[in-house]
Image (tube, rainbow, N blue to C red):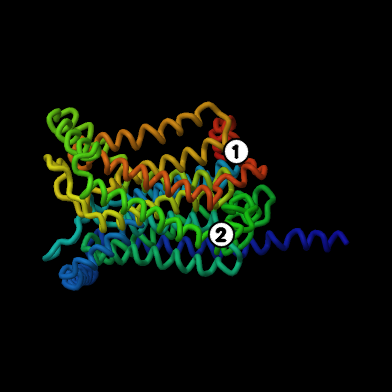
Amino acid sequence: MTAVKETTARRPLGHFAERSVVGLLAVAGVGVAFGLLLMLVRFKWSPMYHADHEAAEWFNGLVAPHHALVTVLQAVTDLGGRPVLIWLVTIAVVTLLIRRQSRLAVYLIVTGMGGLILDPSLKALVGRLRPVVDVPVASAPGNSFPSGHALGSFVAYGALLLVFLPAMAPRWRKPAIAIAAVLVALVGLTRIALGVHFVSDVLGGWLLGAAWLGVTAYAFRLWRRERGRPVPPLSEGLEPEAADKITPAPAEEHVLEHPRSAVAELLVGWVIVFGALYGFGTYVSYHAKGTIFDTLDTDVPRWFAARHTDVLTELSWWWSKFGDTHAILIVSLVFCPLVLAIWKRWRPVLFVALALFGELSLFLASARVVDRPRPAVENLDGQMPTSSFPSGHIAATACLWLVIAIIVFVRTDRWWRWLFVALAVIMPVGVAVSRMYRGMHHPTDFMGALILSGLWIGLLYWVIRPNADVYQGNRPEIESEQVDELDDELAKAGRPE
């Protein structure tokens, strides 16, 4: 009986030892391949040198004449850039800390930081210049070898995949791995096609990324073994027992109780809101002569135009930026993952997504049909692709901060929830003043934006019920007074036991 127990106990360690040797040999092989490629690049091996330059010229001749293709390649290559990767890893780390998975958070931090350090260090060591092509379609700072996009995308997407694989159903894991591999491959190919890297730069980035990812994953698995934990195959992720904790919404059976009726209600409501915007916009644009609306639309832009100063113009430009597409997207891409991490419900995220999508579609449709000219004063932002009514900047800002206030106010009883209520007023008003100061909108364009945001958000709140889970007793993963504990969790996970 004792012999059976010993055999059973040793079997997992034996399997791990076998897998460890194979994995270690694979990592070592990748490292040797990278070292060999590094030497060939460093000493400018003639066959590879000529192959790199011929490939760069061929891709440039293929891509340069097609501006649409260049735009697509730029969009794909951005998925491997530092802003996107740092955002993804940071959101994942914060989510893991909120869910009390600090060991996985440490793994992501160490792996990501290693990638950030290796890229500039090796570029400075090798000192390879970037390709010079006949028709440049893109540019990048610094040296060429290895490709930072190829390295960073391999490390970041690979690490995220290893961490979050347990949260996926088994049937989705292989497709997820395939999608990540295709994405990393596409990012690398775009760097070659855009003429900012040689083929060997991208291969070097992939090899170095694979080596570093393998080293960190191997170290994590050794840590588990030393603490007597089972070490599963990598196809199951780094920590399978954390599946329930890292699943986005483990307790949510369905996002909406009656999705078909909700879609019908939103479609009908969208048409009604569009009708209200069309009616008001047409009236104030073409049929309000001699009314208070006409007086406001004439006098207010002139009043602002007569008070332009360098300081106010600069201030209005910055405040106006709070309502542009990039700012709205950044705030929503930070807010939504945090809500999902804390409350483990998709419905608030759906509320935000539909608010922004509905605002954009209503704005574009109503601006198209109303087709109102800009105020008859100097337009500081120049010619714009859309008409004046309604203001898209103001409407987007109002919708975003209103839905944030609606979600946050109910989900905490802390005093700072009132700050979000204040922001829901201050942000759209500030953007409105800046847009009118810059001569880009009439006061009634501001009114139209308020009509759009008020009616659309009211409709969404009635249909989606974004805070239903709170009223049903759902509690947050971490209370607001526990936020300070996240640093302690991270420090604890980073200390050797």
In this rendering, would 472 be left or right of 363?
right
Tell me the quadrant of the picture where the N terminus can be found. bottom right
Left or right: residue 391 compared with residue 457: left
Rendering coords of residue 162 (x, y %): 53, 57
Above-or-below relation of 481 to 198: above
- The C terminus lies in quadrant: top right
Q: Residues within 10 Å of mark 1 (few under 14, many from 20)?
A: some
Q: Residue at x 35, y 46 (%)?
A: 396
Query: Does the image show residue 485?
Result: no
Q: Is residue 92 left or right of residue 431?
A: right
| Mark 1 secondary-structure assignment | loop
User: Residue 215, how many percent across, how many down?
Assistant: 49, 54
Picture residue at 50% right of the left edge, 58% below the top: 265
Name the outermost residue toward the front. Answer: 290
Q: Does 264 sit above or below residue 59?
A: above
Residue located beneath label 2 in the image:
165
> Which mark is drawn over residue 371?
none
- Name the residue tied to disc 1: 478
Report the amino acid beneath label 1.
Ile
Q: Please determine whether, in this image, residue 245 is positioned above or below residue 37.
A: above
**Amino acid on which disc 2 is placed:** Leu
Res. 299 visible in picture: yes
Give whichever of 193, 403 is nearer the camera.
403
Residue 67, given in percent of the width and then of the height, sits at 19, 66
